[in-house]
Image (spheres, rainbow, N blue to C red):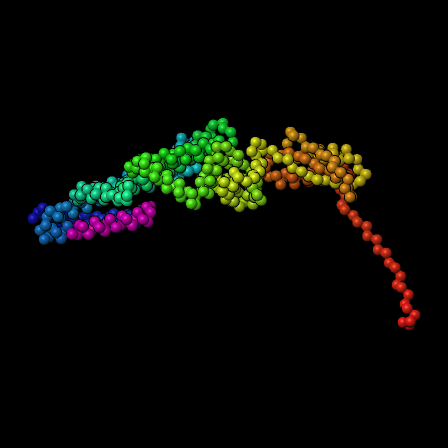
Amino acid sequence: PAARLLLFGESVAVIVWLLAWLRPRLAVSDLTPLWQWALRLAVRCGVVLLASAAGANLVGNIALAVVFTEGVAGSALAAVALLTADLVIEALLIEIIRSDVAQRSRAIARHGRALLGSIIRVARGLMVLVWFGVTLELFALLRPFLAGARVVLDARLTMGTLSLSLGDVLTVLLTIWLSFVVARVVRVLLEEDALPRLSLPSGVPGALSSGVNYAILFVGVLFALSAAGVDPGRVTLIAGALGVGIGFGLQNVVNNFVSGLILLFERPVQIGDIITFGDTTGHVRRIGIRSSTITTFDGAEVIVPNGALIAERVVNWTLSSDQRRLEVKVGAAYGTNPSRVLDVLEWAAKQVPEVLETPSPRAVFVGFGESSLDFVLWAWTDRQDMLAVVRSNVGVAVYDALGAAGIAIPFPQRDVHVTSTAAPPADRRDA
């Protein structure tokens, strides 16, 4: 009787502890609503099991009462321990990411919060698995659960020569997901930390990071197929099926993918270049698997298939040099010394800070207009991002210089002569 009374008191004490101490703390914790809901559900299940244990104790089923009471108490203690570990791990990660050593990494400095969130989510997922396994073991259900799970995962579906199980499918999905995660992390580290520290030609860092990304994904797919037990014969069968699919409707997808590889490795167009494609001019912001993104100077983002960038005419203003020539047309009044106009134009262009000294500005006399002597001023700049502003500054400098030199800029003039004639004499017969 004393043992039963002690067991009953233990059940009641754990119920009170769950409802009076643990549940209020879950409500004020910084966990996400989903985690709080899951923990509140676990608390309710624990209370129900403990109440069942107390009832079983009262009717004399001591074994069931012991299993339920010890299982719930042990599971609750394990949950508290894991929640404490979660807080400790989160605090340690925050301190590590905020440390001076970690902040020297551009990838961590820019993506620290996202990295911290991903690590915490993975750690919490592992803790849930550990808690679930401990809880099953406390209730003596771990071995039956693993045996049942093994039976479900090993159940195979056979269709002709193709035989797959749920375990194979989950293995393939998990391997491919891990491949994408690893590829993304490696790409960020290469683009943010490793490659910027190397003296590489323009466009090479992007090609290397994309190539490594594709290689990791390819190896991940091979590992996934190998883990699923797919032999080379099946791979050949799948490749044949893909070939038939490509023949029926995926030509453009494959064409754009191969064109993207050509853009990355041949580099006729690189990330950051200023190009003109059709009636679109802007910066190349991204070269992806299927398409590339061009950001126009108006702020619009134009999605262009990679195949079009390879097959059609593209003007690349920054392929081998950032220099670009701008042109300003000027007219001077007849009677002005052309040589003096040329000197003034070239001097005015040299006063603009954005104009390059080499090649030097050059003015030429192009002909005799209807009302002016026509000149063209050529100047070079490496400020592709503000070409219109530089052209405006050169135009203002030319206008001011011509005005200071007393050189008039004529405008078209037309003389209109109006001739009046006397009215014809009236016919006498009408009088």
Q: Residue at x 65, y 30 (%)?
A: 359
Magenta stretch containing residue 40, yes or no? yes
Snapshot quadrant of residue 106: top left
In which quadrant will I find the C terminus?
bottom right
Quarter-of-image position of residue 156: top left
* Residue at left offset 30%, top offset 37%: 230
Identify the residue shown where x is 12% and y is 51%. 56
Which residue ends up furthest to the top in the rendered image?
199
> Does residue 222 show up magenta in the picture?
no
| Most common secondary structure along the magenta stretch | helix
Residue 251, percent from left and from top: 45, 42
Q: Position of residue 212 (x, y in %)?
A: 41, 33
- Give residue 210's quadrant in the image: top left
Q: Is residue 101 left or right of residue 321?
A: left
Residue 245, image x and y in percent?
A: 40, 44
Residue 301 at x, y percent in the picture = 51, 45
Q: Nearer the viewer, residue 26 or 385?
A: 385
Decide if residue 293 is on the left or right side of residue 137. Answer: right
The residue closer to the viewer here, 23 or 244, is 244
Please give the range of residues in magenta. Answer: 28-52
Q: Residue furthest right?
A: 428
